[in-house]
Image: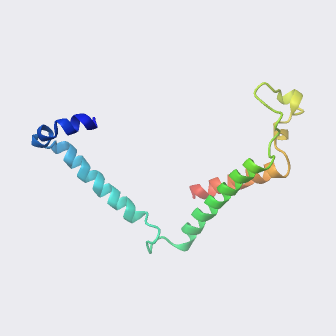
């Protein structure tokens, strides 16, 4: 595409612009500006509580991911071919290793709920 555009640069520049595309570009640019203004972190209308919720949710989700990666949280011997009845004693919750697994599930659940508020 780049080579063809370079070779036919004069012909492409001589073409009339597509009005529909230009109008859509203007509309998209206006929407982008409005979105940036409405969601700017330093806007006075964005209070301390929403900022605290966003930061708390991000921290909880991040910590949950780190713990799940670095510490044993779930039964490493349970796999696709495993049986809940045979390998987990009939209780699916036995896949969670205490306390790390429950901490991860709690942090992730709380972080996800805070993210939705």
- Residue 6 on image: x %, y %: 21, 39
Relative to 71, is 49 above or below? below
In the image, what residue occupies the spot 43% across and 66% down? Answer: 40
Numbered label tally: 0
Q: On the picture, is 92 further left or further right than 5?
A: right
Query: Which of the 4 image quarters holds residue 1?
Result: top left
Residue 15 in percent (x, y) is at 11, 40
Q: Say whether residue 67 is left or right of residue 8.
A: right
Q: Name the side, left or right, on which 70 lies relative to 30.
A: right
Locate residue 90, reporting x and y percent.
Answer: 87, 32
Left-right relation of 11 to 85: left
Rendered-image quadrant of the C terminus: bottom right
Q: Nearer the viewer, residue 108 or 73?
A: 73
Question: Residue, x 24% and y 47% (percent of image)?
Answer: 24
**In the depicted view, which residue is nearer to us: 48 or 76?**
76
Location of residue 21 (image quadrant):
top left
**Residue 98 spot, x, y in % from top left:** 86, 49
Residue depicted at 55% across the width and 73% down the height: 48
Q: How are the colours assigned in the image?
A: rainbow
Image height of 29 relative to 79, above or below? below
Specify the farthest residue to the bottom: 44
Residue at the image position 51 percent from the left and 72 percent from the top? 47
């Amino acid at each position: 595409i780049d080579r063809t555009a370079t070779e036919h640069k004069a012909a492409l520049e001589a073409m009339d612009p597509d009005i529909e595309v230009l109008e859509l570009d203007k509309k998209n640019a206006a929407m982008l500006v409005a979105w940036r203004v409405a969601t700017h972190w330093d806007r006075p209308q964005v209070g301390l509580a929403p900022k605290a919720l966003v930061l708390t949710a991000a921290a909880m989700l991040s910590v949950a991911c780190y713990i799940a990666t670095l510490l044993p949280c779930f039964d490493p011997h349970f796999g696709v071919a495993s049986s809940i009845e045979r390998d987990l004693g009939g209780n699916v919750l036995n896949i969670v290793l205490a306390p790390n697994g429950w901490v991860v599930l709690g942090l992730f659940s709380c972080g996800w709920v805070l993210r939705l508020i």
